Amino acid sequence: MGGHSHWKGIKEKKGAADAKRGKLFAKLLRAIEVSARQGDPNPDNNPTLADAIQRARDASMPKENIERAIKRASGDLAGENWERIFYEGYAAGGVAMLCDALTNNRNRTSQDLRAIFRKHGGNLAEPGAVQWLFDRKGVVLIDKAAASEDDVMTTALDAGADDVRDQEGEWEVVADPGVFNDLKASLEKAGIKILSGEVTMLPQNTVPVDGADARAVLKMMEALEDHDDVQSVYANFDIPESVLAEVG
């Protein structure tokens, strides 16, 4: 899944632009509020909330903004009624797409995403059509120059990781979400610098696409990720690095 790692890096660079920071903050705050409302407002007892807070911190969100979102979730401050919905479908080349959305208007979001899928040569599918192709996992990326495979393997597996994979210039550590925070803490304690870490949806298998189909898939990814209600987009594409580099 090196292509996905490269794509993530490209998106992080684009997302760091000041022009997009307002939209990014709005999405992150929405995720914090929903995670806190649906579970324990204490991140120590709510891994999903802890992950949402960490993503907000990684984006340099002020602490008071995070605290206000949690207060809205607990009813201490007024907030909107958001719900989490997974939208599923297919892109060009038969690539499976899974969109994690937080919306206060299910009909509006469905219509918008259906139009995006159709515009880029795909189609929105019924619930359950593709979600079974993905597993929820914690993923940590480590620069190969920062640690040897033996050091990463020993520390990660001792912390409960499932696997350590060779992804070109990086080590990809995969773990169950329940041990994700402990895994990161163990790697940091061992002096192993982490490039990125997140709880995500990993595809069980990938679909190779190239040429026009690959470009259509990437354009759809960008359009979906840019939608205000979409938190994350997961896909099972395997696209050549040369094509990914074109959008870098």
Image (cartoon, rainbow, N blue to C red):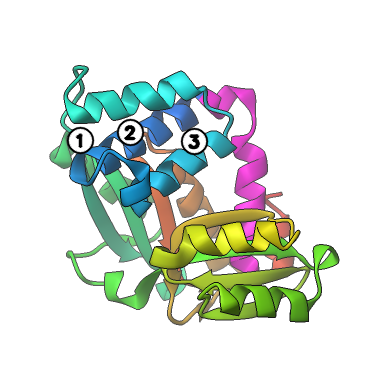
* Image location of residue 33, percent across then percent down: 29, 34
Assign the N terminus to one quadrant of the image. bottom right
Query: Residue 56 — which label?
Result: 3
Residue 31 falls left or right of residue 164: left
Return the x and y of residue 87 as percentages of the image width and height. Answer: 26, 56
Please state which amino acid type lies under the numbered disc 3. Answer: Ala
Position in image of residue 90 (x %, y %): 35, 66
Residues packed near mark 2 inside 10 Å, few (<14), some (14 to 19) or many (20 plus): many
Front tag of 3 and 1: 3
Q: Secondary structure at mark 2?
A: helix
Answer left or right for 234 relative to 247: left
What amino acid type should be assigned to the residue bearing mark 2? Arg
Q: Residue at x 58, y 79 (%)?
A: 157
- Residue 59 falls in image quadrant: top right
Q: Is there a contact, CB below 8 Å, between mark 2 and mark 1?
A: yes
Task: Say which residue appears at 67% left-offset and 41% top-offset.
Answer: 13
Q: Are marks 3 and 1 in contact (CB under 8 Å)?
A: no
**3D distance between C-alphas at marks 3 and 2:** 11 Å
Give the mark, 2 or 1, whose residue is nearer the N terminus: 2
Q: Residue at x 46, y 82 (%)?
A: 205
Magenta span contains residue 8: yes
Name the residue beneath numbered marker 1: 82
Query: Dot 3: few (<14), some (14–19), or many (≥20) neighbours within 10 Å?
Result: many
How crowded pointer 1 is (Cα within 10 Å; few <14, some 14-19, many 20+) is rated as some
Which range is magenta?
1-21
Q: Is residue 219 above or below residue 70?
A: below
For label 2, the residue is 30
- Left or right, 24 with reference to 100: right
| SS for callout 3 | helix
Q: Earlier in the sequence, mark 3 or mark 2?
A: 2
